[in-house]
Image: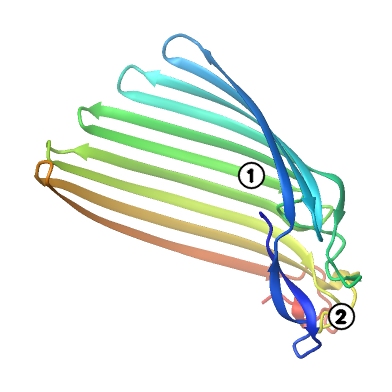
Amino acid sequence: GETTWKDYDGSVLGPPVQAPYYNRVPEYERTRMGADAVYSLGGSLKVKGEYLTEDYDRNGDRYADNTEDTFRISLQWLVADWGTVRVGYRDSQREIDGDYHEHLESGVQEEWAELRMFDMADRDREGFDLYLSVDPLPGLSFGFSAAQTDDTYDEEFYGLHDGKSLMAGVDLNWAITDRIGLAAYYSYDKLESDQLNRTKSDALGTGSFPLPENDWRTEITDESDSYGLELTATLVPDKLTLFASADLSEGTAETVTTNPNFVAGTTVSGAIGY
């Protein structure tokens, strides 16, 4: 299953209320169909078009059926015998088929009716990608790749509103001799998201949802850098090879939560951004 969340079985009245919890994964049936075509513009230039459609038929509590259509076009250019350039563009549209069913616990609304889970909500996705490979000398090659994706959700509802990702990397492979090889890489990743939600009107979670003062917005930014180096040395041909590698990753994460409609004495502590 693609969706997992924490739920309560109500076996213990408290404290805490409705504990313990368990994970529930709703069942679904996925149907995928696609087609692609390649057109050659001479010997070194090719254009490729792709289409994919996916249907999700979910059966269970807290679910929505979805249809997503994806179109992609890419251009590949072979530069003589020493380089390759490929660029691509993708556009996806995901829609809810029928109704969205929020979670109910013993008939009680446990989920804000205006919330849409990110993996079931209506979504527009746009993406670009680039790949470059260069072989300037025999035994030496460089590579560069980058991809950017922008997700936009229906801001009429609560939940995830925007999601962005950027990934880029470079790599080098060098055959220094017939027995010694060196490889290195660097990659950069950045993820950004913006979501809006609402908490119930009391600290115990037994109140009601329709209080705009309990809205909270969270903006998250994750960034990471990764470095790697690998040395390969053949000490005895066909018998003994030495591999040595080192990898380093470092990242930062920032979470900012605010209350756009904060009112002292009305906004409950469970909704307050720190």
**Mark 1 surroundings within 10 Å by alpha-carbon count, few (fewer than 14), some (14 through 19), many (20 or more):** some
Q: Percent position (x, y) of residue 88?
A: 54, 30
Quarter of the figure that contains the C terminus: bottom right
Quadrant of residue 78 within the rendered picture: top left
Q: How is the image coloured?
A: rainbow
Quadrant of residue 134 within the rendered picture: top left
Using the numbered discs, state the Cα–Cα distance from disc 2 to disc 1 in whole angstroms.
Answer: 37 Å
The tag earlier along the polypeptide, 2 or 1, is 1
Q: Residue at x 44, y 20 (%)?
A: 77
Q: Is residue 52 visible?
A: no
Assign a secondary structure to mark 2: loop
Can you name the residue that lies furthest to the bottom here? 15
Relative to 180, 19 lies left or right: right
Which residue position is annotated with label 2? 206
Q: Percent position (x, y) of residue 186?
A: 36, 49
Can you name the residue that lies furthest to the top here? 42
Which residue position is annotated with label 1? 150
Q: Residue at x 35, y 36 (%)?
A: 143
Q: Nearer the viewer, residue 256 or 143?
A: 143
Residue 129 vertical placement versus 136 (above, below): below
Q: Amino acid at mark 2?
A: Thr
Closest to the camera, between mark 2 and mark 1, is 2
Assign a secondary structure to mark 1: strand
Q: Amino acid at mark 1?
A: Asp
Q: Percent position (x, y) of residue 164?
A: 61, 49
